[in-house]
Image: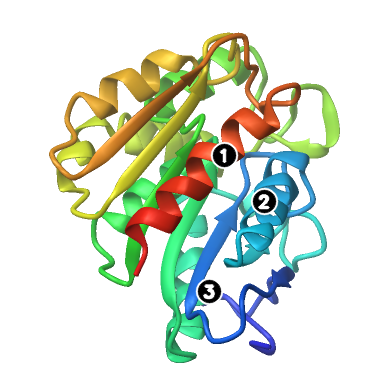
Amino acid sequence: MFGEIRNPQGERLEYDYLPGKEGDSRLVVLGHGVTGNKDRPVITGLAAALQEAGIASLAFSFAGNGGSEGKFEDCTITKEIEDLGSVLDVVSAAGRTIAYGGHSMGGAVGVKRASVDARIRLLVSLAGMVDCQKFAQTEFGEETPDAGCMWEDEDCPLSSRYMNDMASIGSIVDLGSEINVPWILVHGTEDDVVLIQDSIDIEAHASCPHEFVKIEGADHSFSEHLPLMTAPVVAWVQKHLH
């Protein structure tokens, strides 16, 4: 449908496209969190729910993740914002009306991109990361950058590039006021990776049409609560993306 997508570094980004209703130009681009990829259930579950509602989606893996080209050690929020821009270049050229949905660190990528890129007409934040520096220090502060790994996963080495980028970004909470499109935030009350307080804090800055859905008992990936996550997101897209 869209052909090959490459980021500014020339790295090919893998993606899955699920078509919607024929003649419907709406498209939801989906981005995953740190150490994830396009095949995580939180992403595939939402893509399936959107397709059932007649809405197309494109789920992709950021460079260095999944089957996308590039090195995991090069992954940063700043680079992933560029990856997302490359995806937007391709799908917007095809005349699609675009929403972006990001999970976890992919949520931070979405806020940063949507605050400056008018091609994103609707924003979805799923357990979205807000205090990026705090997250990095809490989860990986005891590891040695360029020597240790994220969550003891040898396939996910912890780079100084990543840690420095998170420190440089700090918190994106103030960008809540820079989102000018319909925005839905969904977070589980039992998320112990990105605490629900992140969504509470940034939602307090939002002046755009927005909704904050708190899912009681849900963890970071909504693993036992996927239908409770997908239903309000699909309804929000149906209502606001035109």
Q: Which residue is mark 2?
A: 49
* Percent of width and height locating residue 38: 73, 54
**Left or right of residue 8: residue 78:** left
* Percent of width and height locating residue 161: 54, 44
* Percent of width and height locating residue 209: 21, 44
Residue at left 44%, top 90%?
A: 93
Q: Residues within 10 Å of mark 1 (few under 14, many from 20)?
A: few
Q: Which residue is mark 3?
A: 87
Is residue 209 positioned above or below 50 on the image? above
Tell me the quarter of the image containing the N terminus.
bottom right
Q: Is residue 105 visible?
A: yes
Mark 1 vs 2, N-terminal side: 2
Which label lies toward us, 3 or 1? 1
Q: CA distance from mark 1 to mark 2?
A: 8 Å
CB of mark 3 within 8 Å of CB of mark 1?
no
Q: Residues within 10 Å of mark 3 (few under 14, many from 20)?
A: many
Q: Which residue is mark 1?
A: 231
Mark 2 vs 3, N-terminal side: 2
For label 3, the SS is helix
Residue at left 54%, top 35%?
A: 104
Amino acid marked by disc 3 = Val
Colouring style: rainbow
Amino acid marked by disc 1 = Ala
CB of mark 1 within 8 Å of CB of mark 2?
yes
Of residues 151 and 232, the one nearer the viewer is 232
